[in-house]
């Protein structure tokens, strides 16, 4: 296999890191190993048997090497979805009787899992403000085992004191877990900051083409190995064809995210000046309360932004109906621009009171910017607004 590991730039590593060398039968593109079963070599233990459910086909292994390289971490594991990565990571770190700290304003699916499912397993939690170390100290307990955060929140794009989280966790022996989906490895590498486990919804930027669902757990080798054993039991395996598509998508990751960074900043700047918009949430804007912190952590600000339409839900729906380029759809990170109203989609599982507490109003619009022409996107929104 090919080892790149910081010797070359990210633009080169997304293509070459982790690849088989020599190439398999000389194939430039990674073949799809559409086989559930492989000949055994009398492996040492169950979890090393070559079998598709055990996440060790050639398609899995090349992704594991490549993803760990891109995140500058020790090890990686792909999963059947982003939520499979998050739930598996949490169940790897936590058991019945454990407690952990969680940042407020999580992605809706994660919030629902933590608040509805984990308590049934005997796991407790406390939400905390990521800008208040005093609150972390107040909420920590003798049975606290972990600290779960997001690099940037969805859909308000807040950025917490991530360096402080790592320092606090080290002082108290906590395992740190971070969802790094929104920045992608192009804009941020949490493992280099000291985070123990990094999760991705590979459905989004890593794949980038809105045609698969996948996830990844990346980080400390001992924890990723424990996560693999957990995933082997839970069965959340990514199929070989999806592995192939994810592997292919990663090779254009740096090009796509660079364009999305550029397009999102242009649209955020335009929207901030428009009379039909009362607030824009994008950490690349000087007006964003977390701009300086984001600037110190990230090399780019990503392709996701949100804004409040002054006309509320009615005004937001009318604007969406007039757009020509942006499709009304959930998800993000693809080459096409997508738009949605979080209160009706990603956060529909939360009550109105919970949404309002997080700052997610009925007129909040989330925009996942694609790689179209910057000028065409701005013109489309200028006409629709």
Image (tube, grey):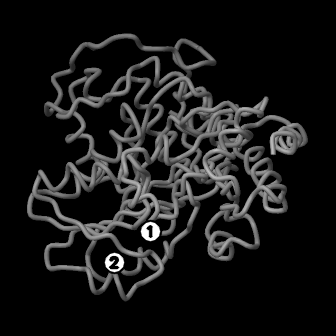
Residue 124 against residue 267 in the figure, above or below: below
Judge by depth and name the residue closer to the eye, 216 or 271. 271
Query: How far from the left and from the top, in percent, is residue 340?
Result: 59, 40
Q: How many numbered badges does the structure rendering display? A: 2
Choose top left, top right, bottom left or bottom right for residue 272. Answer: bottom right
Residue 304 against residue 323 in the figure, above or below: below
Query: How far from the left and from the top, in percent, is residue 204?
Result: 55, 38
**Could you tell me if the residues under marks 1 and 2 are in contact, i.e. CB atoms within 8 Å?**
yes
Q: Write down the residue under mark 2.
A: 170
- State the quadrant of the C terminus: top right
Query: How far from the left and from the top, in percent, is residue 252?
Result: 68, 34
The residue at 23%/57% (across/down) is 93
Q: Is residue 198 left or right of residue 112?
A: right
Q: Give the secondary structure at mark 2.
A: helix
Q: Is residue 2 left or right of residue 336?
A: left
Residue 43 against residue 127 in the figure, above or below: above
Residue 307 against residue 134 in the figure, above or below: above
How crowded pointer 2 is (Cα within 10 Å; few <14, some 14-19, many 20+) is rated as some
The residue at 58%/32% (across/down) is 329
């Amino acid at each position: 296999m090919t080892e790149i590991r910081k010797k070359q730039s990210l633009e080169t590593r997304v293509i070459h890191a982790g690849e088989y060398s020599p190439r398999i039968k000389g194939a430039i593109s990674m073949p799809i190993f559409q086989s559930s079963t492989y000949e055994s070599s009398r492996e040492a233990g169950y979890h090393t048997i070559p079998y598709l459910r055990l996440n060790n086909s050639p398609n899995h292994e090349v992704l594991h090497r490549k993803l760990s390289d891109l995140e500058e971490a020790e090890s990686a594991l792909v999963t059947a979805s982003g939520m499979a990565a998050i739930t598996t990571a949490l169940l790897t770190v936590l058991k019945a009787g454990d407690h952990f700290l969680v940042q407020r304003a999580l992605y809706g699916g994660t919030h629902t899992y933590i608040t509805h499912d984990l308590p049934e397993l005997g796991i407790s939690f406390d939400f905390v403000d990521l800008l208040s170390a005093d609150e972390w100290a107040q909420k920590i307990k003798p049975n606290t085992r972990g600290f779960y955060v997001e690099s940037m929140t969805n859909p308000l794009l807040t950025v917490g004191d991530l360096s402080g989280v790592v320092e606090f966790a080290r002082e108290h022996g906590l395992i740190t877990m971070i969802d790094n989906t929104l920045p992608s490895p192009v804009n941020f590498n949490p493992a280099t900051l000291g985070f123990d486990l990094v999760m991705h919804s590979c459905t989004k930027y890593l794949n980038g083409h809105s045609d698969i669902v996948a996830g990844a757990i990346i980080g400390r080798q001992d924890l990723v190995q424990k996560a693999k054993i957990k995933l082997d039991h839970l069965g959340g395996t990514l199929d070989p064809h999806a592995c192939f598509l994810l592997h292919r998508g990663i090779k254009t990751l740096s090009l796509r995210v660079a364009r999305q960074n550029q397009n999102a900043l242009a649209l955020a700047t335009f929207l901030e000046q428009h009379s039909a918009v009362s607030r824009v949430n994008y950490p690349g804007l000087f007006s964003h309360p977390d701009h300086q912190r984001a600037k110190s952590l990230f090399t780019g600000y990503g392709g996701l932004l949100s804004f409040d339409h002054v006309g509320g839900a009615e005004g937001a729906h009318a604007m969406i109906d007039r757009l020509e380029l942006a499709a009304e759809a959930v998800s993000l990170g693809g080459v096409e621009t997508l738009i949605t109203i979080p209160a009706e989609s990603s956060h529909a599982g939360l009550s109105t009171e919970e949404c309002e507490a997080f700052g997610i109003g009925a007129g909040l619009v989330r925009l996942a910017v694609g790689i179209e022409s910057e000028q065409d996107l701005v013109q489309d929104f200028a006409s629709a607004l």
